[in-house]
Image: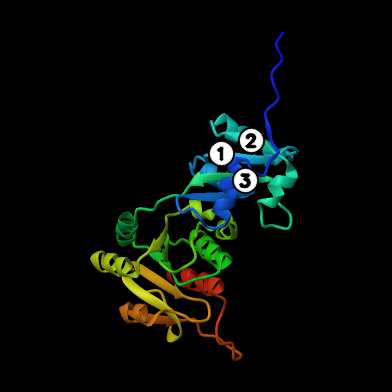
Amino acid sequence: MRQMQAPEVIRSAQNARLKTVRALRRGRERERLLLEGARVIDEALQAGVQPQFLLHQEALGEVAQALVQAAAAAGIPCCACEAGLLAQEGDLDSPPGLLAVAARPQADLEEVFRHAARAPGLILVAAGIQDPGNGGALVRVAAGLGAAAVVFLHGSVSPWHPRAIRGASGTCFRLPVADAVPAARLIELANAHQIDMWGAVVQGEPAIAPTPPRPLALLLGEEGGGLDPALIDACSQLVCIPLQRGVESLNVATAAAVLVHLLA
């Protein structure tokens, strides 16, 4: 009887799929994203994302093995890779042993604003956020506290940066997320759908949910620098979180959590 051959194991750093992972890690592609770890990959699969391929170390735990089997059953190419090679492609102290590459989701921005206007809902806008961890935390806040969508303006970190995806714990697949949106486009859509733009600033009116509820776009600016003056001028209201004991400001993700809880 003819024996089945064991699946081929990637043992060269020059493998084409490992090269793709490196290109994504370095930000050289905008059409695809890198998913790292069982939790993030599982979130993507549950949201209907179909990775183009999945790489995994040869020895897997029970949870990771079940995930690989489910991915393979869904027709996703799954390739074993030497643990040392796979670890080189990650930027974690303890590499999870699972990587996947998928096409980036594309939020329909017009539909996002149309839906927020009907609901009404709150759109969280990253207007210059630079740190990937903060970008991911904003997405997680939006998903967990009921925002309708998250918009990252041009000049902000990408929500599809590998560290941003990890910071969001995969929640970026649970709601619409738009990337590299021009500020002029944001203002145009907000005006077209009668969505108020509110800016989060250090000196502003204490944030209070509008009565009756109405659709809002809440803008949070660059860590340290705050909102661009042109965006401040476009806002109908500037809001803040009253602080005590001489504390001047909060981390942008913490501020987002407080404000979305109050306004969403």
Q: Which residue is mark 3?
A: 99
Q: CA distance from mark 2 to mark 1?
A: 8 Å
The label shown at residue 210 is: none
Quadrant containing the N terminus is top right
Query: What is the three-letter code of the residue carrying label 1?
Result: Phe
Q: Secondary structure at mark 2?
A: strand
Q: Which residue is mark 2?
A: 79
* Crowd band around label 3 with a 10 angstrom C-alpha radius: few (<14), some (14–19), many (20+): many
Query: Compared to 127, does 171 lie above or below?
Result: above
Q: Residue furthest bottom?
A: 246
Q: Position of residue 64 (x, y in %)?
A: 68, 41
Q: Which residue is mark 1?
A: 53
Q: Nearer the viewer, residue 26 or 112?
A: 26
* Crowd band around label 2 with a 10 angstrom C-alpha radius: few (<14), some (14–19), many (20+): some
Q: Is residue 3 left or right of residue 108?
A: right
Q: Position of residue 60 (x, y in %)?
A: 73, 39
The residue depicted at 28 percent of the width and 64 percent of the height is: 189
The residue depicted at 55 percent of the width and 69 percent of the height is: 131
> Looking at the rendering, which quadrant does residue 215 occupy?
bottom left
- Asked if the residue under mark 1 is in contact with the one under mark 2, i.e. CB atoms within 8 Å, the reply is yes
Q: Residue furthest front?
A: 14
> Looking at the rendering, which quadrant does residue 245 occupy?
bottom right
> Looking at the rendering, which quadrant does residue 185 occupy?
bottom left
Query: Compared to 184, does 26 lie above or below?
Result: above
Q: Nearer the viewer, residue 114 or 30?
A: 30
Whether residue 211 is visible here, answered yes or no, is: no
The residue depicted at 34 percent of the width and 60 percent of the height is: 116
Q: Position of residue 82 (x, y in %)?
A: 73, 40
Q: Is residue 155 left or right of residue 136?
A: left
Counting residues from the N terminus, which is met first, the one under dot 2 or under dot 3?
2
Q: Secondary structure at mark 3?
A: strand
